[in-house]
Amino acid sequence: MIILNEASPRVVLCVSSKEQVEGEALAQLMSGAGLPGVVHAAGLADIHPGMGLPVGAAYLMENMVYPHIPGTDAGCGVGLWRTSLKPGKINLDRWSKKLNGLDDPWDGDTVEWLAEFGVEASEPDPGLGTIGGGNHFAELQQIDQVFDADRVKDLGLKKRDVVLLVHTGSRGLGSALFWEYANEGGAQGLPGDSGQAREFMEKHARALDWGRANRALVARRFLSCLSAKESLVADVCHNSVEKVDLSSKEFFLHRKGAADATQGPFVIPGSRDAFSYLVEPLGDQRENAFSLPHGAGRKWPRGHCKARLSSKYGKSDMTHTKLGGRVICHDSALLWDEAPQAYKDIEKVMQELEKHDMARPVARLRPLITYKTRTKNRQGR
DNA sequence: ATGTCC
């Protein structure tokens, strides 16, 4: 743990040495910490440069709400489901062929689905139940190693279970919310006691619920393709603004690529050619602003990846991983952009968490099939 | 990140 600023605001970096973090990410963290209202800023072990502000950071604010900190995908998060797929019947090629229609609008009743998650809607929503782009995915995994058998059992899991990890968010809804506030105070921030802030927080809460509903529907649709059933194990958001009470005072906790550490066990995904970890938060989580890393962290910016990799690797190297997994991504630009090589080492993130007693591993998850999209290339790349 | 830009 590195203290970058002792107080007013307190700024901490949850790593062992500053050299692990890009200068740009550090500068962005300090810039975020300089925003009016910040009392505490924390850079997490997966911190990396983002658009203006770093990804992998949390800010505790007094009487200020900043819509642009969670960004264009408020409600984004990672959910884990146990599946009814039998460990002894794993067949990656057969299962991969069956994963169809996931990029199309769902043919069920989205209004009814949203209502189950507390979201009122009047019209069918073609985006609900779709994964989206960027770093979003649905990944079939298998429990590969158990560190705490009792905890695994408590969570309803068995040691060789096939599980499904879903990383997506609020799609067009969160994007629209971001742009609604982008031009009117989004970056300058809204006074916490203003009507604007209250209105934003209400719409934001809807985006969080929508994101949760979306991950659940992606899980349902994915497993329907495989004639399997699911049950929720954990679902934790990493882009959000949360109203919190601390020593009988109210604050707004902003998270950008920072998992909520107060919701119990959750999964920190590695890259698609690395393990993911089911972890349990430890201690009071105060120094790290009640937040934990949401992944391994990007190493290379999007758009730089193809040039760095395509001379060394072919497309089949990108779709068949060293860990033996399959990757379904018919969008060529996305296939390169989200290459495992573009990400840092999840093992280092785990080492930092254990070293600082922030979280402990409960189980290690091995990727089997990473589903991104069956839609062909985006334009302009 | 984005029913994104034709």
Image: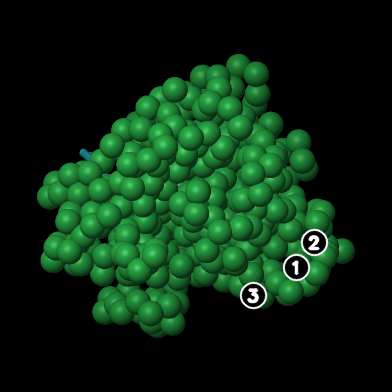
Chain colours: A green, B cyan
User: Which callout, 3 or 1, points at the residue further toward the start of the chain?
Assistant: 1
What chain does badge 3 belong to? A
Which secondary structure lies at badge 3? Answer: strand
When the figure is inspected, residue A338 is found, relative to residue A75, above or below; the finding is: above
In the displayed structure, does residue A153 sit left or right of residue A353?
right
Q: Give the number of the disc on residue A151.
A: 1
When the figure is inspected, residue A353 is found, relative to residue A4, above or below; the finding is: below
Q: Dot 2 corresponds to which residue?
A: A148
The amino acid beneath tag 3 is Ser
A282 or A313, which lies in front? A282
Q: How many numbered circles does the render carry?
A: 3
- Both marks 1 and 2 on one chain: yes
Could one spot residue A216 in this view of the protein? yes
**Quadrant of image for the C terminus of chain A:** top left
**Quadrant of image for the N terminus of chain A:** top right
Residue A260's spot in the image, x, y percent?
49, 58
Which secondary structure lies at badge 2? Answer: loop
For this orientation, the residue located farthest to the right is: A88
